[in-house]
Image: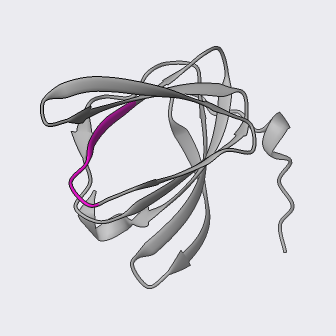
Amino acid sequence: MKRIRARDFTAERAWGAERLALFGSTGVSLHWTDQPYRWHRNTGDEVFVVLDGRVEMKYREAGVEKSMLLEAGDALAIGDGEEHVAHPLGEARILVVEDIDSD
């Protein structure tokens, strides 16, 4: 067993992560960041859970950019192929569940 306090977790760089578990090709990771990620599309579903902080999730639907604010405790299911980018508002800790073979 390994206990990790999400609110105390940090990394050496933005989007640095600690792999918590691996179930076949499904990875569960805790990420720390204070910088936006990059626009991307996953080839598989993703679960994105804000554990600490706030994140503006930007996404595109039919070429139109939209956004939503995610706060601690919010979870977001991102479908296969949905274009998105996460912008933390300050520091954030995020639990991500995704197919690691599709990175």
Q: Where is residue 8 shown, x and y percent of the image?
A: 84, 35
Q: Nearer the viewer, residue 69 or 37?
A: 69
Q: Nearer the viewer, residue 2 or 55?
A: 55
In the displayed orientation, state which residue is furthest to the bottom. Answer: 24
Q: Where is residue 81 shown, x and y percent of the image?
A: 20, 54
Vertical relation: 55 (above or below) 44: above
Q: Where is residue 22 shown, x and y percent of the image?
A: 53, 76
Q: Where is residue 17 shown, x and y percent of the image?
A: 57, 46
The reply to whether residue 13 is visible in this rendering is: no
**Is 54 on the left-hand or right-hand side of 87?**
right
Verify whether residue 84 appears in magenta.
yes
Location of the C terminus by quadrant is bottom left
Location of the N terminus by quadrant is bottom right
Vertical relation: 57 (above or below) 30: above
Q: Residue at x 25, y 64 (%)?
A: 102
Write the start and end of the magenta stretch as one range.
Answer: 80-85
